[in-house]
Image: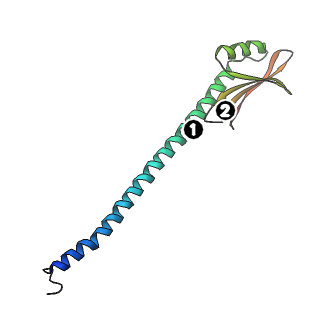
Amino acid sequence: MPGSGSDPDDVDRSATERQPLSLLKKIAMLLFGLFAILFVLLALLVGAGIFLNDRAESRAAAFCDGIALSSPVVDAVAWAERQDIRHLTTRDPVGEIFVFPGWVFNSADCQVEVQDGMVTKKGVSDVHD
């Protein structure tokens, strides 16, 4: 009897029809899992980048706060060298740039302007590439 479900051909046919759907379901779940893992990894990388850039900016601000206006710039340079902080000497305006690395190629800087060997102005630049 057709449609009664007692025919063995009907049972075999319905099992084979369900198998491709089950395979598609497994592939879809696998792809969903891969995308979820990639999303979590991307979120972790972005979070790490934000954390490292914020830390660089905080360290630059703390260093700049420790430099007194009208103090000799050699004191700030010596302090930076003791802490292994990279610094660059500039000519226009005359001064020093103390570099605090952040995420990958980003950094925050404490910029100090100098006149006659004394600190006249200081400030922190935002995180930049």
Colour scheme shown: rainbow
The image shows residue 5 at horizontal and vertical percentages of: 15, 80
Q: Work out which quarter of the rendered image holds the N terminus and state it.
A: bottom left
Does the image show residue 99?
Answer: yes
The image shows residue 14 at horizontal and vertical percentages of: 23, 75
User: Relative to residue 105, is residue 33 depicted above or below?
Assistant: below
User: Relative to residue 122, is residue 103 depicted above or below?
Assistant: below
In the image, taking residue 13 as reference, residue 123 lies left or right, namely: right
- What residue sits 61% from the left and 28% below the top? 58
Q: Which residue is mark 2?
A: 107
In the image, taking residue 18 as reference, residue 24 lies left or right, namely: right
**Element under label 1?**
helix
Q: Which residue is mark 1?
A: 50
Q: Which residue in the rendered view is the most extreme toward the bottom?
A: 1
**Element under label 2?**
strand
Which of the 4 image quadrants contains residue 27? Answer: bottom left
Give amino acid for label 2: Ser
- Residue 17 circle label: none
- What residue sits 53% from the left and 37% below the top? 48
> Which of 8 and 107 lies nearest the eye of the viewer?
8
- What residue sits 41% from the left and 56% below the top? 32
Q: How many marks?
A: 2
Mark 2 burial class by Cα count in 10 Å: few <14, some 14-19, many 20+:
many
In the image, taking residue 2 as reference, residue 99 lies left or right, namely: right
| Cα separation between marks 1 and 2 | 12 Å
Which of the 4 image quadrants contains residue 125? Answer: top right
User: Relative to residue 114, is residue 4 depicted above or below?
Assistant: below
In the image, taking residue 89 as reference, residue 129 lies left or right, namely: left
Q: Work out which quarter of the rendered image holds the C terminus and state it.
A: top right
Does the image show residue 71?
Answer: no
The image shows residue 52 at horizontal and vertical percentages of: 57, 33
Give amino acid for label 1: Ile
